[in-house]
Image (tube, rainbow, N blue to C red):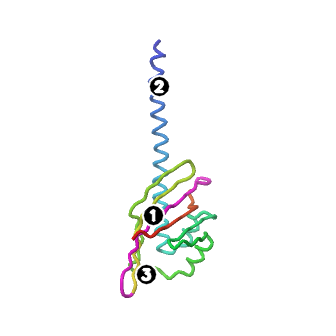
Amino acid sequence: MRASRLFPLSLALWTVAAGVSAQSVEDESSRELRALEDQLSKALVERDAATLDRLWHDHLILISPNGSRTGKAQRLALQGTATPRAAGETNVNDEVSVRIEGTTAVVLVRSTWTTPSPTSMSVGKYRALHVWTREAGLWRLLAVQIILIA
């Protein structure tokens, strides 16, 4: 009789523990993806090809605000010909939203890019959709679509 009363309690505790465990794994992955987004932003503004090579999946598909499509090799080649970072040039992630489903994550990023020129300061606000995939324990950026919002 006593065992029959403990079963519902045991089941409830196991369910809560399983939920907390799944939540903590998702929270850990969300934190990891937010950190990777910060690394990505820094690497882009600093033209850090080595970091971009590490973060980008070999089959990266990137759709630019003008609608053009490029891949990892093309984007890395552009890093070698890019003008050096100008003083005052920044890229700040204003908002990062993470959704994880198994080994795939969809991250929405709203960012502000500031680019100085000799006569003015250009500020662009963008929204990006990033699709990350986890392979062999590592998150890699597989797909990107960027739009100019202001």
In the structure shown, which secondary structural element does the residue marked by tag 3 occupy? loop
Q: Name the side, left or right, on which 2 lies relative to 143.
A: left
Q: Position of residue 7 (x, y in %)?
A: 48, 21
Residue that appears at 45% across and 58% down: 34
Of the pair 108 and 102, the residue shown nearer to us: 108
Q: Which residue is mark 3?
A: 86
Residue that appears at 48% across and 47% down: 26
- Counting residues from the start of the chain, the first of labels 1 and 2 encountered is 2
Amino acid type indicated by mark 3 = Ala
Residue most toward the left?
A: 120
Q: Position of residue 120 (x, y in %)?
A: 36, 84
Name the main secondary structure of what is drawn in magenta: strand
- Counting residues from the start of the chain, the first of labels 1 and 3 encountered is 1
Q: Which residue is mark 1?
A: 38
In the image, the segment drawn in magenta is 118-138
Residue that appears at 43% across and 56% down: 97
Residue 10 — which label?
2
- 10 Å neighbourhood of mark 1: few (<14), some, or many (≥20)? some
Q: CA distance from mark 1 to mark 3?
A: 19 Å
